[in-house]
Image: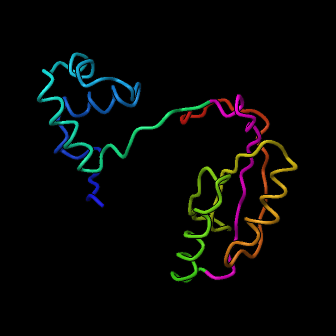
C-alpha cells in the first residue's frame, strides 16, 4: 500500500488540491473536463491524477447511491465494549467486523466503550438480527448499546 501523506502536506500544490476538490464534487469527470476545471492541459492533469492515486491521496472512485431508494434507510449506531483490548484481540475484532456488510463504518473510540459502528439495514427487525447474530458474536464483544437515528440532517457519503 502506498505511503499516505497528510492532505495538508506541502507536496500538494494548488493544482493538486483543485484536482482533489473537483473529483470530490464529481468523481465521474473525464480527464479532459477535469483539466479544464483546474486550469491545466490534459497530459499534465493525467500525470498529476496518477501521482495522486499512486500516492494514496485518491483511494478510489465509487457510485454514491440513495440508501432509502434501495430500502436501506434504517441507521443505528452501536457502541461496542470489548472484553479484551490487547492488540491481538483488537486485530481479531477489526478483521471480523469487516465481514459484516451492514456495518457501514467502524471507528475505535477513546471513551467508556471501544468501537462505534454505523449499521445500515432495511428496518429495526433486520437490525436486531444483525446485532444479535453478527455483531454480538464478534470476537471479544462484552456488551453493546444501540442508538437509532430518527432523522439524518447531513450525510457526507450521500
Residue 114 left/right relative to 156: right
Q: Quadrant of the N terminus?
A: bottom left
Q: Residue furthest right?
A: 125
How far across and how far down the image is residue 47, in percent? Answer: 14, 36
- Nearest the camera: 105 or 100? 100
Colouring convention used in this rendered image of the protein: rainbow
The quarter of the picture where residue 28 lies is top left
Q: Residue at 26%, 33% (x, y): give it.
A: 17
Q: Which residue is found at the position 41% from the left and 25% from the top?
A: 25
In-front residue for pair 87/110: 87
What residue sits 12% from the left and 28% below the top?
Answer: 43
- 65 in magenta: no
Question: Residues in magenta?
Answer: 66-84
Left or right position of 78 against 124:
left
Q: Is residue 78 magenta?
A: yes
Q: Residue 142 location in percent, x, y?
A: 75, 76
Above or below 39: residue 83: below
Q: Is 71 situated left or right of 4 in this image?
A: right
Q: Horizontal and vertical percent for residue 34?
A: 26, 22
How many numbered discs sit on the rendered protein? 0
x and y, in percent, of residue 38 in the image: 22, 21
- Look at 56% across and 69% down and name the residue there: 94
Q: Is residue 115 above or below residue 17?
A: below
Q: Is residue 115 above or below residue 126?
A: below
Left or right relative to 44: residue 26: right
Amino acid at each position: 500500500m502506498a505511503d499516505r501523506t497528510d492532505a495538508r502536506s506541502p507536496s500538494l500544490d494548488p493544482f493538486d488540491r483543485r484536482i482533489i476538490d473537483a473529483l470530490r464534487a464529481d468523481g465521474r469527470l473525464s480527464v479532459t473536463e477535469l483539466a479544464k476545471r483546474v486550469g491545466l492541459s490534459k497530459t499534465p492533469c493525467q500525470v498529476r491524477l496518477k501521482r495522486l492515486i499512486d500516492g494514496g491521496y485518491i483511494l478510489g472512485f465509487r457510485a454514491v447511491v440513495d440508501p432509502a431508494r434501495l430500502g436501506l434507510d434504517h441507521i443505528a449506531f452501536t457502541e461496542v465494549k470489548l472484553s479484551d483490548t490487547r492488540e491481538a484481540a483488537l486485530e481479531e475484532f477489526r478483521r471480523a467486523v469487516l465481514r459484516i456488510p451492514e456495518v457501514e463504518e467502524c471507528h475505535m473510540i477513546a471513551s467508556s466503550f471501544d468501537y462505534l459502528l454505523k449499521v445500515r439495514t432495511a428496518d429495526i427487525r433486520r437490525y436486531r438480527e444483525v446485532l444479535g447474530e453478527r455483531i454480538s458474536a464478534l470476537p471479544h464483544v462484552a456488551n453493546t448499546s444501540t442508538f437509532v437515528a430518527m432523522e439524518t440532517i447531513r450525510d457526507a457519503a450521500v
